[in-house]
Image: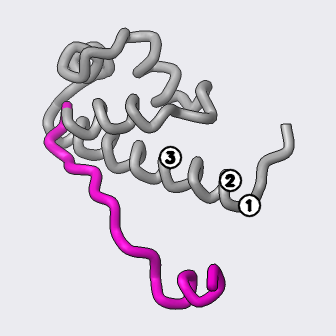
Amino acid sequence: MRMSKQLKSYYKQLNAILDEVWRQAGALGYDEHELARRSGLCYQTVARLESRWTEFPRLRTVILLCQAVGLELVAVELQQKARKKAS
């Protein structure tokens, strides 16, 4: 499957967010089962994401995991350089 640069960047960012979720979960003492319970996701989903078996997580899944560990996902304005390129 060929992906555009923009789509690759999107998934890279989602995976970076998941890295932070795993760090926060570890700091809170949550294992995969606890993270699944707190997020409302099934254990298999959490385990596949943590092992990177699932390469392309859905945004909603990432949001639920963030909420489960007390993180807030916030949209921010693109950097000025990126905005100029789009013009």
Circles 1 and 3, Cβ within 8 Å, touching? The answer is no
Q: Which mark is residue 8?
A: 2
Viewer-nearest of labels 2 and 3?
2
Q: Which mark is residue 44?
A: none
Q: Which residue is mark 3?
A: 15
Q: Quadrant of residue 1?
A: top right
> Main SS type for the magenta part?
loop
Q: Residues within 10 Å of mark 3 (few under 14, many from 20)?
A: some
Q: Which mark is residue 5?
A: 1
Q: Classify mark 1: helix, strand or loop.
A: helix
User: Marks 2 and 1, how far apart in space?
Assistant: 5 Å
Which residue lies at the image location 54% right of the left edge and 83% below the top edge? 83
Q: Amino acid at mark 3?
A: Asn
Which residue lies at the image location 34% right of the left edge and 68% below the top edge? 76
Q: Quadrant of residue 24?
A: top left
Q: Amino acid at mark 2?
A: Lys
As rendered, which of 59 and 86 lies closer to the eye?
Answer: 86
Circles 2 and 1, Cβ within 8 Å, touching? The answer is yes
Residue 78 in the image, given as x and y percentages of width and height: 45, 76
Horizontally, is 38 left or right of 19 in the view?
left
Horizontally, is 39 left or right of 3 in the view?
left
Q: Is residue 4 above or below residue 27?
A: below
Q: Is residue 13 above or below residue 19?
A: below
* Residues drawn in magenta: 68-87
Q: Is residue 84 magenta?
A: yes
